[in-house]
Image: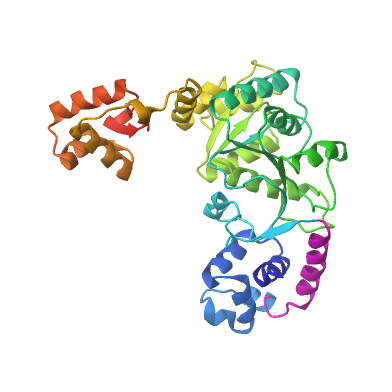
Amino acid sequence: MNEEIFYAMALTRLMNFNFQQALELYKAVGSAQRIYEHRNEIGDVVSDASPRLVEALKDWSDAMKRAEFELKFMQEHQIRAMTPLDDDYPQRLTECADAPIVLYYKGNADLNQAKVICVVGTRQCTQYGVDLIHRFMADLHMRCPEVLIVSGLAYGIDINAHREALAQGYPTVAVVAHGLDQIYPYPHRTTAAEMLNHGGLLTEFMSQTNADKPNFVRRNRIVAGMSDACIVIESKSKGGGLITAEIAQSYDRAVFAFPGAVGMPYSEGCNNLIRDNGAGLITCAEDFVKAMGWEDEALRRQARAEGIERSLFVELSPEASAIVELLKQTNDLQLNILSVKTGIPIGQLTALLFQLEMKGVVKPLAGGMIHLMM
C-alpha cells in the first residue's frame, strides 16, 4: 500500500470538501502522512491553523477506516489513486488553488499530455452542435494528432465530444461527478467502457458517492484545471458549460466559443461569452490552433508527410547557426536582444532572419519577437 495515498484519502474525508484549505495545508506541511504524524501539534506546524481545523485533525479513526475500505475497492477494480506528489497526477491542476489532493483514475491516457483541451456545452445540443464537434475534431486531428480531449460524460455536447474523439483516434477522459462504482448517465456506459482503453474515467469522489448536484460544479473545476484550453459549443444563457468556462478563466486558461444564430436559445450562452470578452471567437480548428500557437506542430507534421525534414536540408552560415543555437537555449527573443547576444548588427541580423524565415527555420511574432520553428 502507498501510505501517502492512504493518508491523503483519509485527509480528504476529514476536510469535508474544503478544497482550498486542504491543499494549503497539504502544501504547507509537505504530505498527508506528515499531517497525520503532526496531527496533535498541527498548530505548531501551521501557525495560522484555525481552532476548528486543529480540532478536526485530531481524530482520524473513521476517516482511516473509510480509506481502508476504498483501497480494497480500488484493488478489486484496477483503479489507481494519485496525489500532487505523483508524477501521473495532472500537473496543470497543481497550479489551481482548489485542486483535489486525491484523484481516482481508471484508464490508460497520459493526463499530462503536451496538449489537453476540454470541450463542454449544453446537455440539449442541436444538430448544429453535433456537426460542429465532428468538423472541429476531424480538422484538429489533421493539424494536431496528439491531443487529450476532456469532458464530463454528460448528455449533449459532452458525450458527443467523447464519441467524436474516439472516432478520430484521440484519447478522451471523462471527469465524473460520482465514484467509479457507477456510471452516470447510465445510457453512456458503453462509451465509458470504450474510453477505458482509449482514455479513461477520472474523479475525486470515493465509491458510493452519488452524482448529486453540487458534485457537478466540483468536477467542473477539474475539467477546466487539467486543460490548456476550454471550448464551449452551444450553451443556454446559463449552464454547466458556462460555469466551466468561468472557472477556466479564473485559472488563466484559454477559453473559446463557437458563435451561433442570434436568438437561438442554445447559442445564447456562447454569443454572450464572446460579446463580453469571456471567450475568443472560433469558427474552425484552424482558428483554435492559431490562437493557441500550435500551428508550428501542424507545419512540422506537413513537412514530415511530404518527406521533408528541415534539419536535413537547411545549411546554415556560422552567423545563422549562432542565431539558431541561441534561440534553442532561450526560446523566443526580441530582435534587439538577439542582436546584442549574437553580436550581429541589426541590419545584417534582419537579412539573416529573413533568409531563415524563407527556409522555415524561424518565424517573426508580434512585438518584434523571433520564434524558432525547428
Q: Residue at x 33, y 41 (%)?
A: 331
Q: In the image, residue 4 lies at what x, y percent?
A: 65, 70
The answer to whether 45 is drawn above or below residue 178 in the figure is: below
Pick out the residue farthest to the right.
186
Q: In the image, residue 143 lies at what x, y percent?
A: 54, 25
The answer to if 266 sits in the magenta stretch is no
* Position of the N terminus by quadrant: bottom right
Q: Residue at x 51, y 30 (%)?
A: 277
Q: Residue at x 80, y 64 (%)?
A: 70
* Position of the C terminus by quadrant: top left
The answer to if 68 sits in the magenta stretch is yes
Quadrant in which residue 343 is drawn: top left
Q: Which residues are magenta?
A: 57-77
Q: In the image, residue 9 lies at what x, y percent?
A: 71, 66
- Main secondary structure found in the magenta portion: helix
**Residue 325 shows in this picture:** yes
Q: In the image, residue 238 lies at what x, y percent?
A: 69, 33
In the rendered structure, the answer to whether residue 230 lies left or right of residue 72 reads left
> Along the line of sight, which residue is nearer the eye, 162 or 21?
162
